Image (cartoon, rainbow, N blue to C red):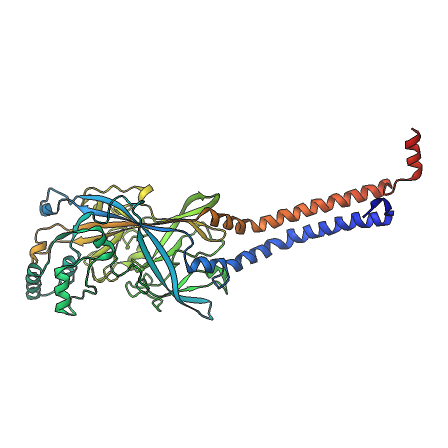
Amino acid sequence: MCCKCCGETQRKSWVFGIGSVFTLLGILLVVLWPNLADKLVENGLKLEPGTDTYDSWLEAPIPIYLSFYMFNWTNPEEIRNPNVKPHFNEMGPYVFLEKHKKENFTFYDNATVAYYERRTWFFDAEKSNGELTDMITAAHAITATVADEMRHKPKFVKKIINFMLNHEGGTLYTTKPVHEWIFDGYQDDLTDFLNLFNTSAIEIPYTRFGWLADRNGSLEYDGLFTIHTGTDNIANVGRLTHWNAKNETGFYKLPCGIVNGTTGDLFPPKMNTHEEITIFATDACRFMNLRPQGNLEVHGLTATRWVGTEETLDSGENYPNQQCFCDPRLEECPKTGVVECKACRDKAPIYSSFPHFYLADPHYLNAVSGLQPDKEQHEFVMAVEPTIGVPLQVHGRIQINMMIEPDDDYDIYRGVPKVLMPMFWFDQYAELSSELASTAKLAINLSDYGTYFGIACIVFGGLFLVTGIVLTITKRWVRRPVEDEDMLTN
């Protein structure tokens, strides 16, 4: 367009028109964009086909690592010496790459989805400190399970059990390679006998014992989960409603036995950073409350750290509201920092804690030697960006322990002390990649980007309007011929 050919009216139309359009556009963006941007982000966070959340939920887009630290019992022959504590050397880590994939899922009209999750592990020798053939000595789990299950039976029954343990493979401890302790399981004479014996009095639901035997690659081992999709209310996304089609676990009295929290891979946006979050741990068949404690920066994003505290694994000793986690059939409840998992773990005398009895009652740490709890290495941490609810870094750290205690009716346990034996601990670790962090930043800042652009439009449009007003006041829209002649003669 040739402005020299435009008249005053045309020039005014262009200047005031462009100024008005950009100013109006800017005002609309500043006023309407924040809500629109929030709606766009929320739609992307809903768990439904076609969203980024759905794709990352279906198959984890980042590497997840499961590190095992095995406790090697170095002095089992001195267990009856009152002057010598059981000593343990920590071995590992033995690191496995963990793959998650949701399968057999069904979406329901009530904004929930039910699914199974197949988890597969692959040994990573480069990240590990040790070989899967390393030999580990630990308490014999099957013997401990049988002795504990039959502890309160009549004397004549226990005499039969004692004879069986003495002649059919019962033992205080055993030494096996790491790969058999973890996934492969080991052949055990007592297990073989009990399966052959086939009695309902002592149920052994496996043919080989391993802490995660029959779990690698299994579709149904972790159970059937039902969670909210957030399509009706984004604040509910990821919230667990049922486990194995029930809203109660059946392992603890209510309210401790309720299925509650999230599975740890989905959180709602706009999280309250002053409140606890709840995750459901299938390995313990219970929920765990984590408390907000400080921040963590990952790839330029700031996350709130939710951590395990002295309350998380308390069974009512210090926090009465958690008394229902203690089985009333127990002679005594575990001290703080340790929770009983018998019902959940095939009736084995299994107890969970944080690694190295971190935050647990000193009684447990003082009963053994070789353990050194450390906040940096043993804290359970889930760092989540609260604006859109994306986990930035996770360290899910739990220790598995086994109780052995004296019983004069069993030769194997006669004269031994009552002690909680650490067996192993694991760290499930994941961190958001830099690429996904960039995507998260865009979602977090989308509202601000639109607002800033709107302000820029207002400024740009305002310049045009101010220019037009000044030109109107000074009457200089069109240069007069007289002015041109004066300029030539001067």
Residue 145 appears anywhere in the view:
yes
Residue beneath the point at 50% across and 62% down: 50
Residue beneath the point at 85% across and 47% down: 6
Residue 408 in the image: state x and y as whole percent: 7, 56
Residue 333 appears anywhere in the view:
no
Which one is nearer the viewer's eye here, 190 or 201?
Answer: 190
Residue 171 in the image: state x and y as whole percent: 11, 55
Image quarter of the C terminus: top right
Residue 195's image quarter?
bottom left
Name the outermost residue toward the top: 490
Left or right: 337 with respect to 62? Answer: left
Residue 302 in the image: state x and y as whole percent: 47, 45
Tally of numbered tags? 0
Which one is nearer the viewer's eye here, 3 or 277?
Answer: 3
Residue 109 in the image: state x and y as whole percent: 47, 71
Left or right: 307 with respect to 192? Answer: right
Which one is nearer the viewer's eye here, 450 or 260?
Answer: 450
Which one is nearer the viewer's eye here, 241 or 185?
Answer: 185
